[in-house]
Amino acid sequence: MPRRAPEPDARRRDAERTRRRLLDAAFDTFAEHGFAGARVQDIADRAGVNKQLITYYFGCKAGLYRTLQQQWLKREETLAPDGGTIADIAATYVRHAVADPRGIRLMLWRGLTDEFPEDFDADPMVDADLAGMRARQEAGELPADIDPRVLRLVLYGMVIAPVAMPELVRRSYGVSPDSPEFAAEYTEQIRRVLLHLGTRGETDNPEETP
């Protein structure tokens, strides 16, 4: 007997499943090899599908990479809810980074090579982030005498450090960066550092101390 064509809902579920598998495989591969070093065939093999499906769903390797970036930006929106302190937000980012370091590894690869899609924007939220930090300064949460651009780099460093220097974590803590013990201790210390920072005011500049 001739096979019946799948129902529209079944086809849609299959398509969504295939896209997810490709995106998961691409995330792993890009995190391991960077954009330039990732091979389309390797991504397809990892996903267990024909590599022509990458062209069908995403156009090309660059389209796959851009889709991952868009997913990452949407995820970031959930990590920094309105009303949270900068200490809470930084601790949340650290917990997610050590639990799933692929996003940080993609960022590190971006710093090692400039071979990316032509319309790729490494951090389209930079202006909004800086505006948010200035607002926190005006509200008194952060010291007014610190350049928000510097503070942003410092916060990035706090989040990236365990992923970028895992051996330093092992030597310092005796555990790997993805261990629950390290995640709990490090996030708590990050919170304390930033809370101490927030207690300083504009008049606490050492150069102004009598």
Image: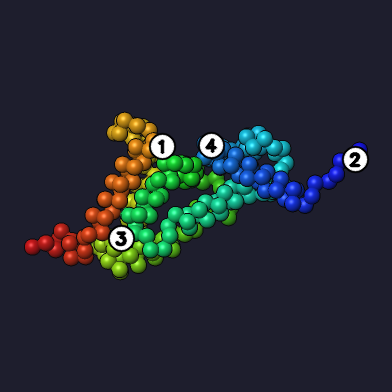
Tag nearer the camera, 1 or 4: 1
Q: Amino acid at mark 3?
A: Asp
Q: Kindly state the secondary structure of the residue where label 3 is placed.
A: loop
Q: Residue at x 30, y 68 (%)?
A: 139
Q: Amino acid at mark 2?
A: Pro
Q: Amino acid at mark 1?
A: Asp
Q: Quadrant of the C terminus?
A: bottom left
Q: Which mark is residue 178?
A: 1
Front-most of 168 and 82?
82
Q: Which residue is mark 4?
A: 33
Q: Residue at x 74, y 48 (%)?
A: 10
Q: Which label's residue is closer to the chain start, 4 or 3?
A: 4
Q: Kindly state the secondary structure of the residue where label 4 is placed.
A: helix
Q: Kindly state the secondary structure of the residue where label 1 is placed.
A: loop
Q: Which residue is mark 2?
A: 2
Tag nearer the camera, 4 or 2: 2
Does 85 appear above or below 38? below
